Structure formats: structure tokens, C-alpha cells
Amino acid sequence: MASSKGQPEVISDFGQIWDDMKSRPLLEIVGVSSLSTVGTVLNAPNPVSKGWEALADKLGYSRDKIEMLRQEGNKMYQKCPGELLLETWGGRGSGSTLQVLEQALIDIDRLDVLEELQKAAKDECTLSVTICIHQKERSMTLPGVWGMLTLGQALEGALEETGLRTDDFEIQGSESESGQAMSWTTKARECKGIHLRLVKKKLPQPRVDVTRDEVCWEELTKIPGFHHNIPDDPAAIHTFMFNYLRDEGWYVIRKCENNKLAVSVTYLGEIRHFRIGHTDGRFYFRKDEFQASSLHELIETYKWNDLPAKCGRLNGSAHNTSNPPVPDRERGVRLLKPV
């Protein structure tokens, strides 16, 4: 773990995250259960390296306090003194930071303990998640998640990419370390070693009357992103969406000529416009592309898939109109966030 200059080398792919979290209190990042392994390594007899007593002295413990830790660690708590030292010092408050502990371990030349500490921090600050929307799944690993954050806080950014909120998902098939069912208020630390599965809730679908190829506009107001009063005019739409042009995927659903529907979406600093067709109860952007059973399903599908090209078919071949498309090109226009 040591470099040629005697300085510690942080675990590969964890360096920036470790630097970001070093100013945080120890117990805010690493839980007591994870400190057990670190304390065991610190406490292990080593004729060459300095032991837990040297670390306690470096952290400002008096001889009497060190002897007390030795006695309590050996009998009352059934924990080794090294483990008990890390717990009690970490519980002192905001001044007991990872950075202070790191420097103390470097000073007593216990880089093996520092490496174990970094492993524990990396383990506790990584969330493994699969997001499921309809029949589409997306798995991801989120590093750098503080243990004291709630799941809602930790996953807010990842869910924002879908245009949905935590209230739109339920956590399935997982229990925390304490045996309780997971919720959005569960601390991220409780999810250590657990793969979370977030499934989009099935919500009542807004009713759209297509029996006469007409749209029930009152019902459409329930769909996020629908704006009834935007004129079917490029200049008016540009003015309405001007503040969203810097980001991709902001969209509005609107009326266009002959009381039809269209969607306008930001992409590469521009606004792209797509007409929505509906025939025999099916909604689509191109009749020979994917067709949805509801407008809501159509919008949700193209949060995860590129909108069909205005001319020519994706990949040069026809798609099965019953299944969502699976583009094999780089990410294009998608409906990510309703205005």
C-alpha cells in the first residue's frame, strides 16, 4: 500500500471519493460493525509495527485511559482494545474525522490498518441498485454514498435521470441489517451488501377517448408535461421552453393542428418536435414503430429509448410494433423530464 515515498496509496478507483469524505466524522462514514475488522487488524500482535496503544497515544489518550481501554476491551465488552479505541474515539464528535485518523495511522506506520479502514469505507459507501420501469431494467453501482444519508437522499440523483421521484417507486425484496423492511427513510448504511431493486409503481392510467379518433383533453391534464394552451407555433414553443434549452430531455405534450397531439423536447440546444398518432386505441410516433396502449405508456417508453427518427427506420429494418424498440446507436432524443 505504501508508495516509494512512504506515503499511502488509496485503493484503486476510490481516491477522489476518499479525499472528499476525509473531513467527515469517522462514525458518519464507517459503522461500528465495520470498525470491528479494522480494530482487529490494529490489535493483532506485530513485533515490528506499533499497536493500538501507540495509536491511542497519538490520538491524545492518557496512560490511564489507555489502561482502561485495555481492561474494558478484554472483559466487559468482549471486544479487543483496538476495536474499542476506534469506537470510543469515533464517538467523540465532529473532530474525530477520517483525516485525523489517517494521519495518526501514517505517523505510527500502520498503513495496513489504514488500508483496512479504506476498504471498510468503500464497502459502506457503495450502493448497488437495479431500477425497473415496466419491463426495462437498469443496474448501477453508486459510490461515495455517506452512510448517514437516507435511501431517498442517496438515490435522488439517479432517479432524477428517469424523470421520476422516489414516490414513484417501491423497494422490493430487501430487508435492512436490523431486519426491517426497506423504506426511503432507511439509512444507506443499513443497506450494506444488499442489492436494491426499485420497481416503478403501477399507477392508474389517465383515460383517453380514442373511439372517434378524438382526445379527451380534460383527462390529458392529468399527464405530467401536458400544456393545453401552448400555440402550435415554433417561436411560441421556443419562448415557452427557453429556460430548459441547456439540458437535454425536457419535454412538453401539446395540441397541434386538427386537435392532434405532439411532443416538443430539448436536444443539443435545440427543440425537436414529434407528432403523436393514435389509431384503434394505439399511440405511436411512427405507425411502423412501437405502438403503446396509452399515451402514458408511450411517454414512459421513450424515457428509456431514443425517439424514432423522422425518416427511415432505426437500424434500417422494421420493428415489432408490440414491443419497445432497442436502439443499437448512441443515445438520441429521449423524453426525460416533463416541463
Image: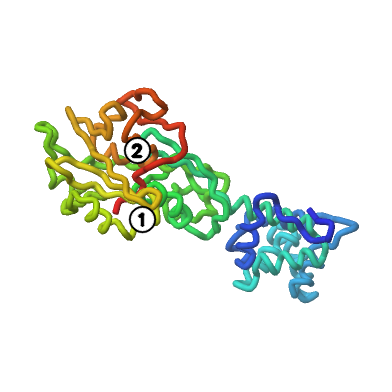
Q: Residue at x 27, y 35 (%)?
A: 285
Write down the residue under mark 1: 245
Up the image or down, 94 lies above or below 120; here it is below
Q: Is residue 30 left or right of residue 221?
A: right
Q: Is residue 40 left or right of residue 96?
A: right
Image quadrant in which you'd find residue 170: top left
- In percent of width and height, residue 230 lies at 19, 53
Q: Residue at x 40, y 35 (%)?
A: 136
Question: What is the CA distance from the residue labelled 2 to the residue labelled 1?
Answer: 18 Å
Q: Residue at x 78, y 55 (%)?
A: 112
Write down the residue under mark 2: 307
72 or 133, nearer to the observer: 133
* In the image, farthest residue toward the left: 212
292 or 319, nearer to the observer: 319
Q: Is residue 131 left or right of residue 54?
A: left
Circle 1: is it few (<14), some (14-19), or many (20+) Cα within 10 Å?
some
Q: Amino acid at mark 2?
A: Leu
Which SS class for mark 2? loop
N-terminal label among 2 and 1: 1
Q: Amino acid at mark 1?
A: Leu
- In percent of width and height, residue 22 lies at 64, 64
- In percent of width and height, residue 241 lies at 29, 56
Tally the marks. 2
Which disc, if any, is residue 8?
none
Quadrant (top left, top right, bottom left, bottom right) of the C terminus? bottom left
- In percent of width and height, residue 35 lies at 67, 57
* In the image, farthest residue toward the right: 47
